[in-house]
Image: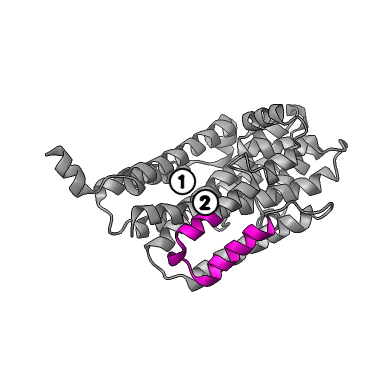
Amino acid sequence: MLSRTAEGLYWLGRYLERAENLARLADVNLQTTTEQVSADGTEAWDAVIATMGAQDAFEEAQAEHPGLTPADFVIYSMHYPQSLRSTIFRARSLAREIREYLSREVFEEINGLYLSTSRPPGEGSHRALYANVKRSVAAILGLFDNTVLLTEGREWFRVGMFLERADMTSRIIDTKYFILLPSPNDVGGPLDRYQWMAVLRSASALEAFRKHHHGTVTGPRVADLLMFERAFPRSLMFSLLAMKRHFERATEHTPDSRSVRAAREIALLELDLRAADSADVIRSGLHQFLDEFQLRLGRIDEALTEDIFRGLPEATTAGASA
């Protein structure tokens, strides 16, 4: 498979996973704002922007367009490349470029998703928009598994999807722990429990938590589920192990010289995550742990891009050295 095509499938997986996560975050935010004292729901939207790491970008956009709302920026802005509309637009553009590697059903579902989000919804229909994105992405992933050949391309698609999922889950946990809680005095109180429940909803994990833990929603319990539970498909551990499995399949015929850096980064991150414990991590600094986790995911992406997707073929490299 051409490196360009592998990279396109990798990013298609990332964009689709990102779109689904953004829709879920926005949907949870919509529910949260109806329960907040502040009429505009500013605090909830601030948390979404913080999760995306987009504070500086939002301030710059707002300075240029004073009437820009957080919702417009996160969901509809085509100037911010991480917004929901921008993400879906880029996914559709990639799907057109690698059309021959997708089934007709997958391509049509991606195209339909793009068309359904190309215009802002009418007043009061935001919930329907978010539900449509989540449902459509779920359909695309199911169709991809059941109508696309089980080749190297499918593995790269899944590598991108699970890397993006691990990154977003870590950001969701980090935002609550480091940003949302107003005061240490609130730990264990009603506000603390409410915000941790919002974190679980943001990760589609509330039902899984209730089945796994028959007790009060607490920070350590939520962190344990979302970070270390191998049976939960959105946890850091599950996502990392799945990414490793698909990476190994995707690089089965790739020269070691091109795959070894990414393989090493993935293996070391897995070992460190296996050795960690939620209580110890929280005690020593959850924000620092998650911040380092995100940086290491970035190093994996960098290794994939530089050594595999855009690395020079070995024959060319040898000729240049000679």
Q: How many numbered marks are there?
A: 2
209, 117: nearer the viewer: 117
Q: Position of residue 252 (x, y in %)?
A: 30, 59
Q: Which residues are magenta?
A: 92-117
Q: Nearer the viewer, residue 15 or 172?
A: 15
Q: Is residue 142 visible?
A: no
Which residue extends farthest left?
322
The question of residue 61 being in magenta is answered with no
Is 310 left or right of 49, judged from the image as shown? left
Residue 179 drawn above or below residue 167: above
- Identified by mark 1, the residue type is Arg
Instruction: Determine the residue positioned at 50% across, 38% down.
Output: 293
Q: Residue at x 84, y 38 (%)?
A: 40
The residue under label 2 is which amino acid type? Answer: Arg
Q: Give how far across and how far down residue 113 sits, in percent.
A: 63, 60
Q: Which residue is mark 2?
A: 14
Upstream in the sequence, badge 2 or badge 1? 2
Observer-nearest of 76 and 129: 76
Which of the 4 image quarters holds residue 322? top left
User: Magenta stretch containing residue 110, yes or no?
Assistant: yes
Magenta stretch prevailing secondary structure: helix
Q: Which residue is mark 1?
A: 274
- Report crowding for label 2: few under 14, some 14 to 19, many 20 or more residues within 10 A (C-alpha): many
Residue 305 drawn at (x, y percent): 38, 44
Residue 111 in view in this figure: yes
| Residue 223 sits in quarter | top right
| Tag 2 secondary structure | helix
Other residues around mark 1 within 10 Å, as few (<14) / some (14–19) / many (≥20)? few
Q: Is there a contact, CB below 8 Å, between mark 2 and mark 1?
A: no
Residue at (70% x, 26% y) in the render = 63
